[in-house]
Image: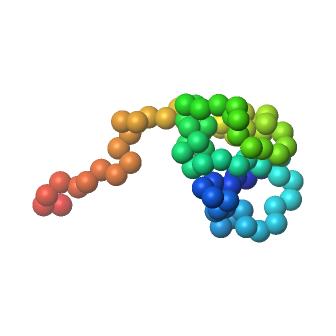
Amino acid sequence: MVQWEHGEGRRNRACRRLLLGVDLTLTLTTERLRGLLTGRATADGIGHEGDLNALSRLTALLDAPAPAFPIVTPWGCGR
């Protein structure tokens, strides 16, 4: 399991509870997290505790980013 802090020490709600078996904890900005998950940034210089190989295991599960993917497609008029 990977958990992360983003912004100024904020954690998402799921990370506020006690987590057992955490492989890696990262401390980084949201922008840096997006870069890591899309392969545009490396873990160099990011605060961390634990096994950095957990990050590689996580990113190996993700598809390559597709910037042209239409996340929201508006319906045409008259539908």
Q: Is residue 12 visible?
A: yes
50, above or below 17, in the image: above
* Residue 54 locus on image (x, y percent): 77, 39
Q: Nearer the viewer, residue 41 or 57?
A: 41
* Residue 67 locus on image (x, y percent): 40, 36
The residue under the point 44% across, 34% down is 66
Q: Quarter-wise, where is residue 59 in the image? A: top right
* Residue 46 locus on image (x, y percent): 70, 40
Q: Quarter-wise, where is residue 75 in the image? A: bottom left
The residue under the point 63% across, 58% down is 8
Q: Is residue 2 visible?
A: no
Q: Nearer the viewer, residue 71 or 48?
A: 48
* Residue 33 locus on image (x, y percent): 60, 44
Q: Left or right of 54: which side holds 71?
A: left
The residue under the point 63% across, 54% down is 6
The residue under the point 68% across, 55% down is 5
Q: Left or right of 45: which side holds 77?
A: left
| Quadrant of image for the C terminus | bottom left
Q: How many marks?
A: 0
